[in-house]
Amino acid sequence: MEETKYLPADFKTDQQPRWCPGCGDYAIFNSLVKTMAELGVAPHETVIISGIGCSSRLPYYTNTYGFHTIHGRGACVATGVKVANPGLTVWQVTGDGDCLAIGGNHFIHSVRRNVDINVLLFNNQIYGLTKGQYSPTTKKGFVTKSSPYGTVERPFCPAELTFGAGGTFFGRLLDVDLKTSQMVMMAAARHKGTSVVECLVNCVIFNDGAHGWLAEKETRDDRIIVLEHGKPMIFGKNKDKGLILDGYQLKVVTIGVNGISENDILVHDAKCKDTFLHTRLALMEGPEMPIAMGVIRDVDEETYEMAMENQINEIKKQSSVKSFDELIDACEQWEI
């Protein structure tokens, strides 16, 4: 049977996406439908679950099954969908507020269980839909409508939460980098288990330029390192910079200076079960260090729905009752 080829248009509805002009959500949406087309999973075998927030409008714009749920509860519904019908490809679309504030508990437990869902975490470091309050990822000191003198709270790092909960996949992308976005989304979709993808997006109204210093084309290559499993951690406009370990810390070096060669540069191992180096990579901050993009972690573990199915099958083998009728017949009965 010939394999069906899909186009991005096959995954779009007739609804015009409505975000603020210049919002990074447009770019993520376009990368997602391109990824879905390349993945080759039929629209009727795909589900998009969202919570509440600007990004959570996305199910209306995709020609798949979808569920626009309540604030912070997308992970619960996504888990239920996947466990009830493991054959479906499930995407959860959420924001930094929806996922890490009211939905934080559900997020860490879906990661801990390793449910086979793909979580797209739109991080604009602000509450956009409710008009500009600080979120769990807002930088300390940032002035917002709910922190007029600057927030005194330390922000969450989504990667740290993911690794702390035993996460098996973490990737990061920038809204304007379409090539890397599709690469990371494709890897997330192919991973068996909870895939967390932090999408750095711009909110042009309430936090414009939050990631602007990364988005500038002229300097982006010097400020970002795109990680790929099995490849040296080299970056820079001239591909002459790399990462090495200096004790327990990562250090930027220049190839060809002080005797440094490409052989000295660390090779990325996304499959390593230990989280030490993955955490160091995810926590890098500029301008001294590049910001890590791409697939940072991608390890294999049993998924939640697979474990449940195996347990049910094992119990069935041990039980003398094989059907509901047999269960009823085995019980004490009365005739009235």
Image (cartoon, rainbow, N blue to C red):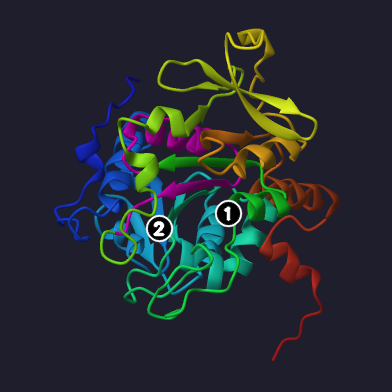
Quarter occupied by the C terminus: bottom right
Count of marks overlaid on the render: 2
Is residue 178 one of those drawn in magenta? Answer: yes
Q: Would you name the residue on which mark 1 appears?
A: 158
Range of residues picked out in magenta? 175-203
Q: Residue at x 48, y 69 (%)?
A: 135
Residue 74, visible in the rendered structure:
no
Please, is residue 118 above or below residue 51 in the view?
A: above
Q: Residue at x 67, y 34 (%)?
A: 299
- Could you say which quadrant of the image residue 180 lies in? top left
Quarter occupied by the N terminus: top left
Where's residue 196, x and y in %? 54, 47
Where's residue 217, x and y in %? 30, 32
Where's residue 291, x and y in %? 51, 38
Q: Nearer the viewer, residue 97 or 3?
A: 97
Q: Secondary structure at mark 1?
A: helix
Q: Give the residue type that dot 2 points to.
A: Asn
Please, is residue 145 above or below residue 211 in the view?
A: below
Is residue 64 one of those drawn in magenta? Answer: no
